[in-house]
Amino acid sequence: MKILLALDDNPRAVEQALLIARGRGAVLNALFVIDATWEMFTGHDWLSGCNARIGFLEYMLSQEEEAAVLALKTYKEQVAGIAGELLTVTGDVVDEIRKEAGKDYDLLVMSNPFTRGLEIMRDPVAKVARKLPCDLLLVRHAAKREESS
């Protein structure tokens, strides 16, 4: 069995992918996509009139890279003893997940909602699931406890 884990900030998705991989003796590849669609989202500098766009894009790239480092570090700490690779690519989050999932995987594990880059504002799960060549396991984020007053 070959499993793909789409990494975001949901530790439950990692836990579920690891549980399945260990239980089935599966290969587990984890994919982190650095979102490269911010440029399309922001439009052109002539719209802002102050050349603020390039500064924003540089800031977002640094945020994406920091998120990648944190996600990969956290994943590496938990994956000991499981065969597989850690993949990092830059591009459109949905496109890159679908492209990788098309490489003979049996299962894709991802968060619902999926929170990577601009996908926070979109519906990436529906886009990824459309014409997906493997099974899909969606893992909800942990419910936040209500604080007692």
Image (cartoon, rainbow, N blue to C red):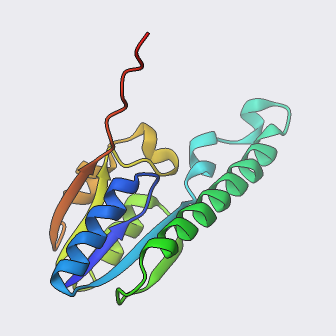
Q: Residue 56 versus residue 141: which sits nearer the camera?
A: 141
- Left or right of residue 33, residue 57 in this image: right
Q: Residue at x 52, y 65 (%)?
A: 74
Q: Is residue 85 above or below residue 64?
A: below
Q: Residue 55 versus residue 3: which sits nearer the camera?
A: 3
Q: Is residue 131 visible?
A: no
Most distant residue in the front direction: 148
- Left or right of residue 71, residue 111 in this image: left
- Position of the N terminus by quadrant: bottom left
Q: Quadrant of residue 16?
A: bottom left
Q: Is residue 29 visible?
A: yes
Q: Is residue 5 above or below residue 47?
A: below
Q: Is residue 148 above or below residue 29?
A: above
Q: Quadrant of residue 107?
A: bottom left
- Position of the C terminus by quadrant: top left
Q: Position of residue 27 (x, y in %)?
A: 28, 87
Q: Residue at x 32, y 52 (%)?
A: 111
Q: Position of residue 82 (x, y in %)?
A: 35, 86
Q: Residue 149 versus residue 12: which sits nearer the camera?
A: 149
Q: Position of residue 20 (x, y in %)?
A: 20, 73
Q: Residue 140 versus residue 94: which sits nearer the camera?
A: 140
Q: Position of residue 5 (x, y in %)?
A: 34, 69
Q: Residue at x 53, y 63 (%)?
A: 71
Most distant residue in the right direction: 50
